Amino acid sequence: MCLVIGPKLLSGFEVTDRTKKIAMAYGSWVTVFFLIALYGALFFGHGEYGVSAHLWLTITGMPFSFISWIAPHGTVLGVVVAGVAGIIQWCAISEFWAWWDKRKGDGEIQP
């Protein structure tokens, strides 16, 4: 999981600066859509805002975010699951890129 606490992950694995930036950017993206879904649920009582937020997060976090489809569609829970799945996926991809660059010997890993 890509929950950054200081310079290390929860597992003690150090992450690159690029991964931290991706986690912050995608985390902001998820927060916006979470707030949109919450706004629709609290003030309008229907799931149209939640369905849209869930769909956007599923599209931007594919394919791993499809796991969020086990949660009820259009709910805040579905949006949270899609967001967390997207963050995990993009952090893993970023770390894979860093590993690949290091393995190929392309020099220093760019932040």
Image: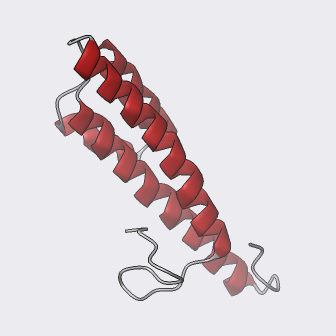
Q: Is residue 92 left or right of residue 37?
A: right
Residue at coordinates 57% horizontally, 71% vertically from top-left? Answer: 96
Locate the N terminus by quadrant: bottom left
Q: Residue at x 41, y 59 (%)?
A: 88
Residue 32 visible in image: yes
- Look at the image and tell me in which quarter the C terminus lies: bottom right
Q: Position of residue 14 (x, y in %)?
A: 52, 85
- In this image, 32 relative to 107: left or right? left
Tell me which corner region of the image, top left, top right, bottom left or bottom right, holds residue 97. Answer: bottom right
- Foreground: 94 or 53? 53
Residue at left offset 22%, top offset 12%: 46
Pick out the residue farthest to the front: 43
Residue 100 higher or lower than 24, as above or below: below
Q: Which quadrant of the structure image shows residue 105? A: bottom right
Residue at 27% across / 40% down in the picture? Answer: 68
Given residues 92 and 11, the one toward you in this image is 11
Q: Is residue 34 above or below residue 103?
A: above
